[in-house]
Structure formats: structure tokens, C-alpha cells
Image (cartoon, rainbow, N blue to C red):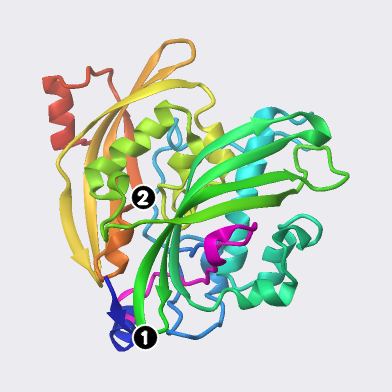
Amino acid sequence: MRLPFLPFLLIALALATEGCGTFRIEAGFVQPAALTATVEAGPTRPTGTPAPISKSTNTPVPGTALTPTPISPFAQNVQSGSASQPASAEDDTDAAVQTILDYFDALNEGDYRRAYRYWSGEGASSLRSYDEFAHGYANTVHASVQIETVSEEGVGIARSRTMSVTLASIVNEPDHTQDVQRFQGTYTLQPGAGTASREAAWQIASANIAEVSSDGQPPANVADPVTLLRSYFEAIDRREFARAYTYWGYLGKASRQTFAQFHEGFATTDHVAVDVGNPEMGAAAGSAYADVPVVIVATQSDQTTQAFCGTYTLRSTQVPPFDQLGWQIEGAKTRVTASVQLGSAEAERLLSGCTQ
């Protein structure tokens, strides 16, 4: 779906909490190149204006991201261990995932110098000069990024992490319209030269991203609130925590946790199952909102179970072509409840009203 530039000025007013960034895809994407995503916080950039978005995007918009109760494994805010401890495979993976998120954040902030340095060789592995790199981010209005899977290879200085990603970009076209482009591919990261600790900086060594066809609809896993939440808990159950984290808005920041903290919150969770109730829908300022009741049963590594009930709040921008990006998690309120069997009458009662 295409949208003339003039109505976009009205969209900018309706999306006061949306951020903007820039995005470049080289023809065929044969060579590694940079991509950007937009943190969905801060003012929207007017069409064609290269100014960075608000620096305040390091913090989610107040009131939009409610953290579940700390006792929940879905809300633990556990700091990682000290830097003096030996690095583990999970430490490496957490740091590599955070590097990709920080890379996108730098681009969203308009801090292209910092973004460029996330590529190894002080940017050389992007295969472009800094000026070429910075110039590449001129036409993208908005982009969403989801990390699908993370594969681990090697140990020590030879270790690497490869992440498969899905991206959707809203771009300004030469004919003064806007369109959605979708991409899939991988980033491969390696530790910075000479670093060995768990706090080591990871850098992008290469990327392989290609454009894929789009039917003008949101991806199936974020097409509606219930499907999104089921996809989220499926990702947790499969221990695909990077995928789960990027279902949250603002590059995961709506969870009010770093990726390592989010991951650590599931350290003792073996698997999880969920009942999802009927969404309560609402709308405001060009967005649709859904409060979705849930009952969660988490089985711990010692095979004990914990049950939780509450509500997840999701949002979707309804202004074309932004509506093609689908839904994201904005916040959640959960509490511990007595042991319950999913699908039972008691679970149905909790879905109807999880009262204190």
C-alpha cells in the first residue's frame, strides 16, 4: 500500500510516540551492508528530514510499559554477574544480541559514528566508508526488527554468533509515496579484537540480507493480539529468548529490562504453557490497543510449577502503511496465583478477572 507524502504529515501527528530512523538496502544485497530499526519512542521525524530522533529513547514512554511482578519468571530483573567471571556461551550470546540491539539504537538516534563502529575494523567490514554508510540512511521512515534465532559457533577468540533476523521497512519512494519493504537474512558477530571477558564488545563481521516479497499484510505471527501472545510464549517455551524479547516494543525496551536481564529471568524455567482470553480492544491517536488476559503455568527446572494470571497490553499502529507492521507488546501486569490447570473452569474464571 502506498501513501502520498502530504498525508504523512498528519501521520506524524498521530504517531507522537513513534520513532524514526533510516534504512538502506544495496541492490540485491550481495555485499554485507547495514540496516536500521526504529525505536518506537520519541517524536516522529518529518518526511525527508535527516535529523535524529529524541535522545530520550533509552527509556520507554512513561505509562506504556508496565512490568509484571518481580516474583514472576517473566519479570525478574536480575543483573548479570561480575565481569571477573569467565565468559559462558550464554554470556556471549546475550552480549552479541545486545550489540545488534544497540547498533539499531545508535542508528535510530542518528548516531551514525557509533553505529559504524559496531562493524569490525572500525567500520571496515561494512565495506563502505563512513560517509557512504551515513548517506545510506536517507529514505526510511520506520523499520521493525525481530531476531528469530541465534546460532553459536566456536570458543575463545574464534567464537561467533549468527542471528537470523526479519525486518520490515517503511520507505519514501521516488514518486513521493511510501511503501513497505520486507527483508530476511543474517548478521554474524565476533568479539572485538583483543577482548576475552564476558563484557567484551561484540562487533558485526558480516551481514547477508535480502528483500522478500510482501502481500501487504502484517506477518502472521503478529497479525492479531492473540496470535502474537501465543507466539511470544511459544518462543519462551522453545528458549528462543531473543525472538521473545523483540516481540516487546521499542527494541525490547518496553520490558524495562536489558536482554541479559530478560534472559536471566528465565534461568530456572524449563517450559511454559498459557491460556489466552478474549482481548479488550481500544483505540487512541491512530493506534489500536488490546488488553489480553492470560493464565500462565511455568514449570521450573526442578519440575515444580508456578502459576500466574494477569493482562498483557499490546499496540498496533492503524495508519497505512504502518498497519502492515502488526502488533507489539507494550506492557504487562501479572501476579502469582494458586496452582491451576489450564483449560479448567478455574482458569476460565481467572481469564474473566484476575483480581488481587
Q: Amino acid at mark 2?
A: Gly
Quadrant of residue 80 within the rendered picture: top right
How far separated are the C-alphas under marks 1 and 2?
A: 36 Å
329 shown above or below 71: below
Q: Helix or strand or loop: what does disc 1 sit on?
A: loop
Q: Which badge, 1 or 2, comes first in the chain's sequence?
A: 1
Classify 10 Å Cα crowding around label 2: few (below 14), some (14-19), many (20 and above): many
Q: Position of residue 151 (x, y in %)?
A: 59, 33
Categorize mark 1 by other alpha carbons within 10 Å: few (<14), some (14-19), many (20+): few
* Residue 272: image location, x then y, percent: 37, 24
Residue that appears at 48% across and 33% down: 240
| Residue under the point 77% across and 28% down | 155
The residue at the point 30 percent across, 53 percent down is 327
The x, y position of residue 295, in whole percent, is 25, 30
Tell me if residue 25 can be seen.
no
What residue type is disc 1 on? His
Q: Nearer the viewer, mark 1 or mark 2?
A: 1
Q: Which mark is residue 176?
A: 1
Q: Which mark is residue 331?
A: 2
Query: Where does the magenta region start and end?
Result: 13-36
Magenta-drawn stretch contains 17: yes
Residue at 80%, 61% in the rendered image = 122
Q: Quadrant of residue 211?
A: bottom left
Q: Is residue 33 above or below residue 71?
A: below
Considering depth in this image, is 41 or 20 the residue closer to the camera?
20
